Amino acid sequence: MSRCYTVIIDGLGCGAQPDAVSYGDEGTNTLKHVCEATGCRLPNFGELGLGNIIPITTVPPVETPKASFGKMQEVSAGKDSTTGHWELAGLELETPFPTYPNGFPDSILEAFRKGTGVKGVLSNEPMSGTVVIEQFGKEHLSTGRPIVYTSADSVFQIACHVDVTPLETLYEWCRFARETVMTGEHAVGRVIARPFHGEPGSFERLSDQRKDYSLPAPSPNLMTLLEDAGKKRYSIGKIIDLFGGVGFTQFRKTNSNAEGLSQLLSQMSAGIPDSFTFVNLIDTDQLYGHRQDPEGFARALQEIDRALPAMIGKLQEDDLLILTGDHGNDPTDESTDHTREYVPLLVVRGGSDGVGRDLGTRKSFADVSASVLDYFGVENRLSGHSFLDGLH
């Protein structure tokens, strides 16, 4: 009757990794810096042992944490969502997805133009999504040319106003780019449709109509092994997109953390036996980390903090709840990009004695998949080592 819930707080790092300097992220610490900048208090996270992982001025350590606690180091090359989630699912990548700090080469843009019939594109630079539509949105309205841009992540993004380019056309362009253009040496982690609306000076992205076109995750991975073992697999949030739309029994897209938390609590209430639920709470990253907004980031963390008692209260005997991140996104640094950081790890087991233990610094995010497989009694044929030994 086993149930496991793994919740990813997107962009929640807890300190620069030893190799962060290679990524330009030396000195970053999303969790610590958000709390220091805002005075953010997280009492329920604190009871679980969040303050036992790293020193946080507003979240002190506790003598008897209710969760087992630690932090995890990313092994894979990169610091994007796809890389982080794939490693959480047991896939360690030796070669990073391609990035384009100087924009896409002419060969890519020419292939995209020929295949879609557009006369040209705007931008072709690494830019913030809100800035790029502010800067090029008016020209897009007058010319009809799509705004093509990237970031520090491995992404090919297309932004179009819904009154200029119908949603289905934008989606079709993205599918074409994913399947035909961004392949081989240019196989980026994600092609992303970024629709927006509004007037010049007040453009607004339509996040609920965004679509991500990811590469299919290599097999075997956590989901394929659970499927082979007859376990149900549920995605809440953008998880399904990061795995190329495959590998799950059912998925539920969400427009906000509030909706994601509501969906998770409903799933926990259902108590589906032999099920794994994979959740992404995106607001910390998408709305606040990338926009250099520590106050907003703190509010999002507090929203999750308030939901923790309900989550833990719904755990049945021997259920497993894992809380972690996928990378950092320090809103107090000088960049709007993700940051190469450790991520926190909190593990709660339903019906336990309520006393957690120190899980230390895990050598890979893949320890999550190893632990989930261990929990379900499935042989681990992936990377990582289980942290369940000794949990009460």
Image (spheres, rainbow, N blue to C red):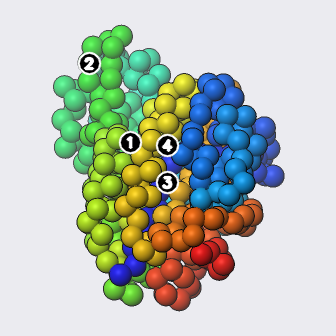
Q: CA distance from mark 4 to mark 3?
A: 13 Å
- Please tell me which residue lies in front, 67 or 175: 67
Amino acid type, label 2: Gly
Residue designated by label 2: 198
Badge 3 amino acid: Ile
In terms of depth relative to the viewer, which is nearer, 161 or 235?
235
Callout in the foreground (1, 4) = 4
Where residue 384 sits, quadrant-wise, is bottom right
Which circle's residue, 4 or 3, is located before the other in the chain?
A: 3
First in sequence: mark 1 or mark 2? Answer: 2
The three-letter amino acid code for the residue at tag 4 is: Asp
The secondary element bearing badge 3 is classed as strand
Density class for disc 1 (Cα within 10 Å; few <14, some 14-19, many ≥20) is many
**Label 4 belongs to which residue?**
305
Mark 1 and mark 2: Cα distance apart in space: 24 Å
Amino acid found under the numbered disc labelled 1:
Asn
Q: Residue at x 34, y 85 (%)?
A: 230
Sort mark 4 into few (<14), some (14-19) or many (20+) by Cα contacts within 10 Å: some
Q: Where does the image place residue 379, in percent across and percent down from the top left?
A: 53, 89
State yes or no: discs 1 and 3 in contact (Cβ < 8 Å).
Answer: no
Residue 323 percent coordinates (x, y): 53, 57
Is 291 in front, or is 189? 291
* Residue 8 disc label: 3
